[in-house]
Image: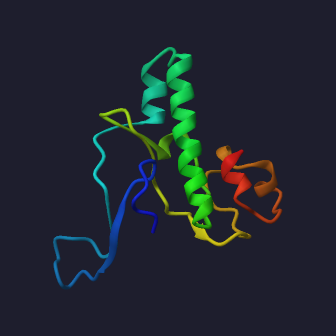
Amino acid sequence: MVSGHENIVDFYGAYYHQAPRTPSLPEGLWIATEFITGATLQDLIGTRKTLGERWISYICKQITTGLFHLQKKNIIHHDIKPENILITSYGEVKIGEFGFATFGEKSSSTSGTITYSAPEVLANFTNKHEYDHK
């Protein structure tokens, strides 16, 4: 999908597993992505009283850089929220969880987490890349 950018979790492939082949694995879609050791931004927010201005600025810059890369690839994430921002044990910031992502400049999708959705999306306006950036 979008592998190869420092602020995006690398995607290696997908596979649909049918239960009769290997009964110990549940049937369904399996997705292989980069293994991240660290925490989500939500975890970080929950464990600290304050993150500090420099750290917040760094995190925001990395998220913005990742979103800009997605925009150049015509990918709309649809679910930017603290749980989907990963902070590696090395301090790298990566956007993950592309389950609601779509390709193209426009999407009529209102998928994603309602509490993090832009008002325009909830009002059923045409969805564009700007909604990931708000």
Image spot of residue 132 (x, y percent)? 66, 52
Q: Is residue 38 above or below residue 130?
A: above
Q: Number of callouts in the render? A: 0
- The answer to whether 107 appears left or right of 73 in the picture is right
The quadrant where residue 94 appears: top left
Image spot of residue 56 (x, y percent)? 54, 25
* Nearer the observer, 61 or 78: 61
Q: Residue at x 21, y 71 (%)?
A: 25
Q: Residue at x 69, y 67 (%)?
A: 109
The quadrant where residue 63 appears: top right
Image spot of residue 9 (x, y percent)? 40, 54
- The answer to whether 80 appears left or right of 18 in the picture is right
- The answer to whether 69 appears left or right of 5 in the picture is right
The answer to whether any part of residue 11 appears in the image is yes
Quadrant (top left/top right/bottom left/bottom right) for the C terminus: top right
The answer to whether any part of residue 77 appears in the image is no
Quadrant (top left/top right/bottom left/bottom right) for the N terminus: bottom left
The quadrant where residue 28 appears: bottom left
Image spot of residue 16 (x, y percent)? 33, 79
- The answer to whether 22 appears left or right of 120 in the picture is left
User: What colour scheme governs how the chains and residues are painted in the rendered image of this protein?
Assistant: rainbow
Q: Residue at x 51, y 33 (%)?
A: 59
